[in-house]
Image (spheres, helix red, strand yellow):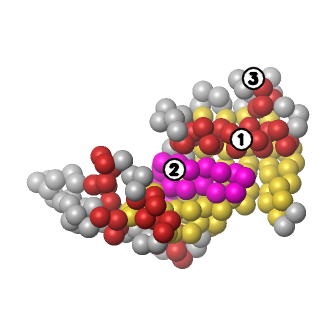
Amino acid sequence: MNPGWQTPSLAELRETIARALTDAVGDVRDPWRTPVLATSCAAAGPQARTVVLRSADLARRRLTAWTDARAPKAGQLGADPRAEWCFHDGARRMQLRVSTEVQVHQDDAIALAAWAQVPPGNLMNYRTTMPPGTVLGEEASAGGGLDGTGPAHFAVLSATVTELDWLWLGEGGHRRARFRWDDDGWSGTWLIP
């Protein structure tokens, strides 16, 4: 266990969280690389799904993920930009909930810069003729056909972090801390787990 997780210093704990998120981006085996992203939908209520963390920079209060712009989450975030990311690591017995405000970028400089980073094998995920969630017949291909449109359906979810809620289920006792952003910067407090 990284000693930063056991620190009595809230500032050190926040830095440990920031490093762990940044490290997760580059490690496909890290469980924090695939958080659950929860949004709200007026018609259907809360919606949650796993996404891939593409960047994390807590100094700038930024998390990003990619999506097909036709996916329900893109529309939901357009209507209500509030979202919560839940990072879970069963081996470390740790959970991090991150409250954010998300902006959906499509056909702009941010989306085009990210599109240039999409691995060639993943490009087809954003080039299907049908949107995500379309029902396919038994004889239909799993890919739904490709339309070759390039980045037309590609979007970046750029999230501004407003709160962190960290929980560790330690064998010697559970620990929990919350960090909130305001005009004066980050403020942290220990909480009863």
Q: Residue at x 32, y 60 (%)?
A: 126
To which quarter of the image does residue 149 belong? bottom left
User: Does 78 appear above or below 32?
Assistant: below
Residue range corresponding to the magenta coloring:
47-65
User: Does 145 appear above or below 164?
Assistant: below
50 in the magenta segment: yes
Check disc 3 and report the residue beneath it: 171
Q: What is the C-alpha distance between the residues marked 2 and 3?
A: 32 Å
Q: Amino acid at mark 3?
A: Glu
- Residue 93 lies, in percent from the top left, at 66, 31
What crowding class fits label 1: few (fewer than 14 Cα within 10 Å), some (14-19), or many (20 or more)?
some
The residue tagged with tag 2: helix, strand or loop? loop
Q: What is the C-alpha distance between the residues marked 1 and 2?
A: 16 Å
Mark 1 or mark 3, whichever is nearer to me: 1
Q: Earlier in the sequence, mark 1 or mark 3?
A: 1
Horizontally, is 190 left or right of 133 in the view? right
Q: Which mark is residue 54?
A: 2
Q: Are marks 1 and 3 in contact (CB under 8 Å)?
A: no
Q: Amino acid at mark 2?
A: Arg
Q: What is the C-alpha distance between the residues marked 1 and 3?
A: 20 Å
Q: Which mark is residue 17?
A: 1
Q: Residue at x 85, y 50 (%)?
A: 188
Q: Are marks 2 and 3 in contact (CB under 8 Å)?
A: no
Horizontally, is 188 left or right of 145 in the view? right
Q: Residue at x 88, y 34 (%)?
A: 8
Residue 73 visible to the viewer: no
User: Does 155 appear above or below 78?
Assistant: above
